[in-house]
Amino acid sequence: CGAPTRLQFAELNEEHRNAIDFPVGKTVQYTCRPGYAKVPGMSPTLTCLESGVWSEALEFCKRKQCSHPGEPVNGKIISLTNLQLGSTV
């Protein structure tokens, strides 16, 4: 396999970051990026398959939930349905 898949929610662990060629059966591990948390029970790994491609990258890291931003002094919050990383209130 070539270089492992680049993921929006996780980064490849340091030991494999600069490698470009991986043997069949090789497993690489990812770490959740800042603002993301690991989903319990899901493995943060990809494996080089016999077909020469990486296994499917499941979403093993989810955006973290932010706390309530508080009420504005001279206004009000109209819609507060999503408080995940990157959301706008």
Image: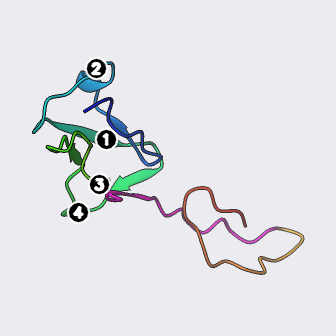
Name which of mark 1 and mark 4 comes first in the sequence.
1
| Mark 2 to mark 1 CA distance (whole Å) | 17 Å
Callout 4–callout 2 Cβ contact below 8 Å: no
Q: Nearer the viewer, residue 87 or 75?
A: 87
Gap between marks 2 and 3, in whole Å?
Answer: 19 Å
Q: Secondary structure at mark 1?
A: strand
Left or right of 59, for residue 81? right
Report the residue at 32% width, 35% height from top: 4
Q: Name which residue type carries label 1.
A: Thr
| Mark 1 Cα shell of 10 Å, populated few (<14), some (14-19), many (≥20) | some
Name the one closer to the observer, 74 or 61: 61
Q: Dot 3 corresponds to which residue?
A: 56
Which residue has dot 1 on it?
Answer: 31
Give residue 36's position: percent from left, percent from top.
43, 52
Name the colour scheme. Answer: rainbow
Which region of the structure is painted magenta?
57-72
Question: Which corner quadrant of the image does residue 59 belong to?
Answer: bottom left
What residue does disc 4 label? 40
Which marked residue is nearer to the observer: mark 3 or mark 4?
3
Mark 4 or mark 2, earlier in chain: 2
Q: CA distance from mark 4 to mark 2?
A: 28 Å
Mark carried by residue 16: none
Secondary element at image label 3: loop
What residue is pinned by disc 2? Answer: 19
- Identified at 74% across, 72% down, the residue is 71
Q: Is residue 34 left or right of residue 43?
A: right
